Image: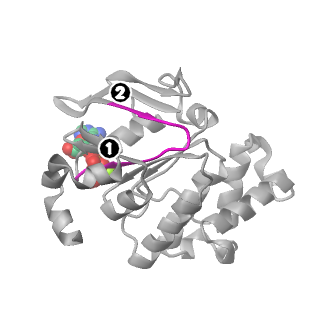
Amino acid sequence: MLEVRKLCKSFGGLQVTRNVSFVLEPGERRVILGPNGAGKTTLFNQLVGTLTPSSGDILVQGRSVMGLSVSARAREGLSRSYQKNNLFEDLSVRENLMLAAAAGQGKARSIWRDSFRDAEVRETVREVAQQVALTDMLDMPVRSASYGSRRQLEVGLALATRPRILLMDEPTSGVGPTMIESFHRLLHSLPRELTVLIIEHDMDLAFDVADRITVLNFGEVVFEGTPDETRGNKVVRDIYLGDWQANA
Ligand SMILES: Nc1ncnc2c1ncn2[C@@H]1O[C@H](COP(=O)(O)OP(=O)(O)OP(=O)(O)O)[C@@H](O)[C@H]1O
Ligand SMILES: [Mg+2]
């Protein structure tokens, strides 16, 4: 479904992605773990298309997406939510979701005129709002929504485009324990055929939702395996020693 081949990226003399390769099967839940500065967001940006790799290849369903823009990749089914909020502040939760749903259905050209009446768009908004637990907040302006709700909306925007592959960069960064718990539920409630790649700091989330875990350190894949294999791995333990003790 998603294949990354020997991806490399340097900023000047600093190599931040080193020969990164992995393959995601359709419907797989993959978590990419790594400490601060490991190169996770840099990798994410190359997948999304906001950053051009120095070398290597990225394939979606066997076809290279290297030359494609962010929106062209989205049309190939690759959708994402960011580590930082990227929302229309003055619009309501519903309007934000509508714009994403309309864009996902190729109706972007006449968004304002038709989206509010478009049955398919409205149905998508209703479904997604339920998935990300924002049904009660649909008419709230984004600017008055809590940080946690905004993070849920971020995921909702990505889902509203009806992606085949959902990419998320630290979806739980900065949110409290209750939100994290509801986020775990959200991930478990996603359609099983959706392929999901999550970049995370939080090992609990990785162990809870991942089919496989890839560990990045200094831009390099140092480990890949199931959650159980990851738990028992010495390299991973050394990298994460502090967190592991804290979580024990
Ligand atoms: N545009 C840039 N120019 C130069 N160096 C950069 C640039 N973007 C990132 N870096 C460097 O690349 C390395 C990896 O950064 P990146 O943001 O990908 O890490 P990360 O794993 O996402 O970290 P975090 O867990 O803090 O989000 C860091 O050393 C960072 O300083
Ligand atoms: Mg990051």
The answer to which of marks 2 and 1 sits earlier in the sequence is 2
Mark 2–mark 1 contact, CB under 8 Å? Answer: no
Out of 144 and 235, give the one closest to the viewer.
235
Q: In which quarter of the image is residue 135?
A: bottom right
Task: Decide: is 204 above or below 22.
Answer: below
Which residue shows up at 35% across the image and 27% down it?
Answer: 53
Give the prevailing secondary structure in the magenta stretch. Answer: strand
Where disc 2 sits, the SS reads loop
Residue 24 colored in magenta in the image = yes
Residue 197 at x, y percent in the picture: 45, 46
Which residue shows up at 53% across the image and 71% down it?
Answer: 149
Mark 1 belongs to which amino acid?
Gly
Task: Decide: is 30 above or below 178.
Answer: above
Task: Decide: is 215 above or below 205.
Answer: above
Residue 140 at x, y percent in the picture: 65, 75
Neighbor class of circle 2 (other Cα within 10 Å; few <14, some 14-19, many 20+) is many
Task: Decide: is 141 above or below 205.
Answer: below
Judge whether residue 92 can be spotted in this image.
no
Q: Which residue carries the number 2 mark?
A: 53
Image quadrant containing the C terminus? bottom left
Left or right: 30 in relation to 71: left
Residue 81 at x, y percent in the picture: 50, 52
Where disc 1 sits, the SS reads strand
**Residue range corresponding to the magenta coloring:** 21-35
Q: Which residue carries the number 1 mark?
A: 225
Residue 227 at x, y percent in the picture: 34, 53
Residue 111 colored in magenta in the image = no
Judge whether residue 100 can be spotted in this image.
yes
Mark 2 belongs to which amino acid?
Pro
Q: How many marks?
A: 2
Left or right: 134 in relation to 238: right
